[in-house]
Image: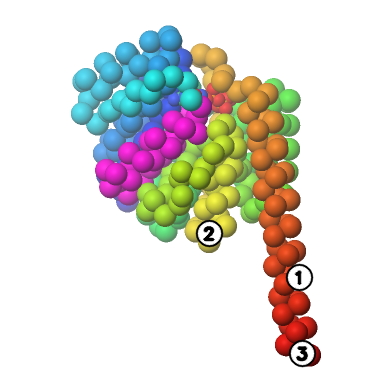
Amino acid sequence: MTSDSRTLVLVPTYNELASLRSIVARIRASVPKADVLIIDDASPDGTGALADSLAATDARVGVLHRPGKQGLGAAYLAGFRHAITDDYHVVVEIDADGSHNPADLPSMLDLVDEGADLVIGSRWVPGGSVHNWPAARRLISRTGNLYSRLMLRSRIRDITAGYRAYRVPVLASLDLNGVSSQGYCFQVELAWTIEKRGFRVVEHPITFVERTEGTSKMHLGIVTEALWRVTYWGVRDRISLRSTRRSSADRDAGAGR
Ligand SMILES: Nc1nc2c(ncn2[C@@H]2O[C@H](COP(=O)(O)OP(=O)(O)OP(=O)(O)O)[C@@H](O)[C@H]2O)c(=O)[nH]1
Ligand SMILES: [Mg+2]
């Protein structure tokens, strides 16, 4: 049984006029009891106006207009605050470009019902796949995930994935004001923080389909942000682990004297 009630599906948009109507219809069909919040950063192509018209004809659809493009991370943080304030049980992240199939949502929500704190729609676990990605894009994703896993000592296979369901009280327990990364790195930071806190992270295999409409907002800055932040966190954790070990060894030696 899927409890899609008290679920808020966040759909961040920047210039997604071509795909927004279809993705919202597919989400509504897949999880009819869930609410949908479109978070638009003043898209110049009129996505915000389309979002308003979708909301005007469907009480389960709402729109959060933001004054300008501030990045995916900032858009999602605004959506999370909304989910916390309005007392939702589960909050979902999904791209507006059709890369994530809303038909996966009932299974992902079932996993939350069964006890997962974070469910990641994963391309890189058995059963998961990617359609229509050039070899270079696959390589970036696979290498970035492997590097993050090793640096952060994480068990998550697709830590950069943007298709997710979070248990809202878990998000509420985090210091969201302290989350500062933006693109893929925003996803890495949140998943890693949740995993480190000992919450239950489950990966659900999905087929990711490259967008066929609109243009990607991915750029080199997003990749370099992830690279330097993951490196910084990994090195910082190793240094603090080493100094913790050293001070407990000193303490033990002192006690043995
Ligand atoms: N509100 C808001 N949404 C954004 C922003 N940047 C990206 N998005 C949305 O975030 C989702 C993911 O962005 P994409 O451009 O598809 O990025 P991607 O999926 O990493 O890259 P591709 O695989 O090339 O499509 C889409 O729904 C975008 O419209 C932003 O600054 N603000
Ligand atoms: Mg995309």
78 left or right of 218?
Answer: left
Residue lying at the far bottom of the rendered structure: 257
Which residue type does callout 3 highlight?
Gly
> Label 3 vs label 2: CA separation?
33 Å
**Is residue 147 in sight in this rendering?**
yes
Residue that numbered label 1 is attached to: 246
Amino acid carrying label 2: it is Arg
Q: Earlier in the sequence, mark 2 or mark 1?
A: 2
Identify the element where label 3 is drawn.
helix
Q: Examine the rendering and report whether any part of residue 112 can be seen.
A: no
Q: Nearer the viewer, residue 21 or 256?
A: 256
In-front residue for pair 253/161: 253
Q: Are marks 3 and 1 in contact (CB under 8 Å)?
A: no
245 over 110 or under it: above or below = below
Q: Nearer the viewer, mark 3 or mark 2?
A: 3
Which residue position is annotated with label 2?
197
Q: Identify the residue at image location x=33%, y=39%.
A: 82
Residue 93's label in the rendered image is none
Residue depicted at x 52% and y 42%: 179
Chain part drawn in magenta: 71-96
- Looking at the rendering, in which quadrant would you find the C terminus? bottom right
Query: Magenta stretch: residue 235 in it?
Result: no
